[in-house]
Amino acid sequence: MSITLTLADWLTLLGHFLTLSLLSIGGVISTVPDMHRVLVDDHHWLLAPQFNASIALGQAAPGPNVLFVALLGWNVGLNAAGGPPTGLLSWASAALGMLLALVGILLPSTTLTFVASRWAHQNRELRAVRAFKQGMAPIVVGLMLATSWVLTTNLGTSRQNWPLWLLAAVSALLVWRTRLHLLWLLGAGGLLGWFGLV
């Protein structure tokens, strides 16, 4: 995929991730629906398969789950350079996309978290602080459900994809009702994918 990005587009990319950083309650994965809206639907900087692959690879890699944001920025930069890295310009463009996405997603939330956690710790007995913590739980759950909806509907909602939907439902039920470690579920999903069952 080849796109053309102006300076205003690069600043839009940075600004979008700066904004999402402050909305990433429950982790950056909760902002995936809006990332999809802007990067795939509105600006067409990424294709839906690139978007999904970036998230899957970033989540599968060891380390913080924010790595998928770096891959999204990397892929936007590669697309702006005309596709896979062929020279110094494409590597530089990909690195710029990665840098803007990571700085955008990390800087505001890190700063706010540092300041707010110090204040909340000092005032942890206040009723408003306790109420705020309890009130954020449903918002986090809603954002996570929206993320799962976007990722699964990109795979298709036709009847031929029923094994994926069944696997998602069974996994959600097991996480909710048992103490089964998530790595076992990831491993089972990987094996089912390996054998072509999902």
Image (cartoon, helix red, strand yellow):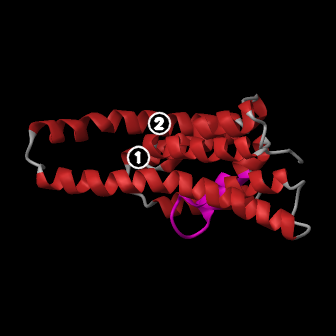
Q: Residue at x 12, y 54 (%)?
A: 122
Query: Pointer 2 and pointer 1: residues touching (CB < 8 Å)?
Result: yes
Which residue position holds label 1?
26
Give the main secondary structure, helix, strand or loop, of the magenta stretch.
helix
Disc nearer the start of the sequence (2/1): 1
Which residue position holds label 2?
143
Element under disc 1? loop
Would you place residue 38 above or below residue 66 in this image? above
Would you place residue 21 above or below residue 56 in this image? above
Q: Quadrant of residue 138?
A: top left
Q: Which mark is residue 165?
A: none
Q: Which residues are magenta?
A: 53-70
Q: Is residue 193 left or right of residue 84?
A: left
- Residue 22 x, y percent position in the rendering: 43, 43
Q: For the residue marked with disc 1, what is the amino acid?
A: Gly
Q: Is residue 65 magenta?
A: yes
Q: CA distance from mark 2 to mark 1?
A: 8 Å
| Front position in the image: 108 or 173 | 108
Q: Residue at x 67, y 35 (%)?
A: 38
